[in-house]
Structures are given as C-alpha cells and as structure tokens.
Image (spheres, grey):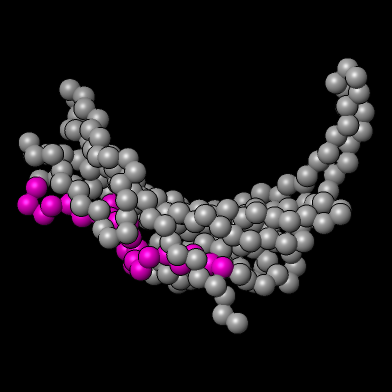
Amino acid sequence: MSIGVSTDYLGLATTNLKVTNAAENATINTAEAVNERGDIVARATYESLTAPSCEYTVCGDYDMTTFALGELKATDFIINGFTISTAGGTAPKVTATAGLVTSGAVEGYTYPNPAFTLKSAFEAQALFAAFALTADEDNYIQSCNATGQCSLPRGLDESGETCAFDVSGATIEVTAEICMLSSTVPTITPAANWTVTSPATPTETNTAYTIYSITLRYTPAAVAASA
C-alpha cells in the first residue's frame, strides 16, 4: 500500500464511485474485574471486530440501488449505514459503514434503497426525490444530505464470539437546507412514503438570507434473501 491508495473494504468502488478515504476501525471487547476499592485486578479480552467505513467521491452518475442496508459483502461485512452529502460547488460524497460478522455467513434480509440516480454534478440534489419545491417560487436547495442505517444485533457463543446475527429497524433520513430569496415561504411537498419528521424551520439573521431546514424519513421494506 502506498500514499494515495485507500482500501475499499466494502467493494463498492466502480468507475463512477471512487474510494478516497477508508478506516478499518478495529476493536476488541474487554472484561475487567475490580476489588472492593474499585481498582482493576484482572482483565480479559474477547472477540476482535472491525467496523470499516469508506468514503467515496461520485465521479459519474451513480445508481443508489447498487447496494442495500443489510447487504453481505464477500469480505464478511454487513452494510449497516451510509451517508450522502451534496451541496453547491462541492463534489457529491457517499460514505458507507459495515460490521464484521461470522466467516462464511449467509445473507438474510436486506433493505433496498429507493430508486435514485445520484448525479456527479457539483450541486445540491433533492436526494431520493424525497421532496419537491414549488417551481415558481424563488427558493433554492443549498445543501441536501441523507443518512441510512439499520441495527446489526448479534448472538454470542460460550466464548463471547459472534455465532448469529440479523439486521432490523432500517430507516433513511434526508435533511435539506433551502435558501429563501422571495417573500414566499418555501412550499415543500414530501414524496409518497416520506414523512416530515422535522418541519421546515427558518434560521434568520440580519446579515444573511433566510435558510429553511427540513428533515424527512423513509422506512425501507425488508426483503428476504433468495432461496
């Protein structure tokens, strides 16, 4: 490995998605015994795990259904989170996180992303088409980010090692900042199956244009692995 080379732990890199930063995030579980004073008198370790994260730059239009929460990668990693960031004048970024599971594990349920093509343009995008702005209002999306996550609960054996796992509780949230230039409050319409969890709220100062922030949430359906 040399300078400028990041490890694609999750195998998501393509011609249009280039890995730029990566971390292995290795941990080891620790058990400690204390005496009557609260001093540590013994220590044991068990189950070393890794939870890698990889950041990718979008270099060409990218289909967000290419991967899914709960997806098992060939390296025995389960994808359990991702973020997308877009803003004017900034290259779109995708970051994915995962947890290590048992060697030779079999994929169970996954949570596919809604159909959406992430553009490589250096501009804010209404991610997953989660909302729409009324076209005739003089307001603009300044930034838009998304976060997807699911739980990765584990079952442990007599040695404290993972012997079973599953995924559950997946959600996707989209947060947008909208710059208001007109005297009309932005009209933001949620898409089907998206719920506003933080209503459009303005941030106002006497030295800047008013910025409205809104958060919407989507619950992807679990899909069982093919037999």
Residue 220 is drawn in which quadrant? bottom left
In the image shown, does 170 or 129 lie closer to the viewer?
170
The residue depicted at 25 percent of the width and 39 percent of the height is 200
Residue 212 is drawn in which quadrant? top left
Question: Residue 111 magenta-drawn?
Answer: yes
- The reply to whether residue 16 is visible in this rendering is no
Task: Determine the main secondary structure of the stretch shown in magenta.
Answer: loop
Question: Residue 124 magenta-drawn?
Answer: yes
Q: Position of residue 60 (x, y in %)?
A: 37, 68
Farthest bottom residue in view: 227
Q: How many labels sit on residues?
A: 0
The residue depicted at 88 percent of the width and 17 percent of the height is 37
Farthest top residue in view: 37
Residue 198 is drawn in which quadrant? top left
- 74 relative position to 97: left or right: right
Give the position of the N terminus as an image quadrant: bottom right
- 58 relative position to 189: left or right: right
Where does the magenta region start and end?
109-137
The residue depicted at 15 percent of the width and 46 percent of the height is 187
In the image shown, does 145 or 110 lie closer to the viewer?
110
The residue depicted at 75 percent of the width and 67 percent of the height is 103
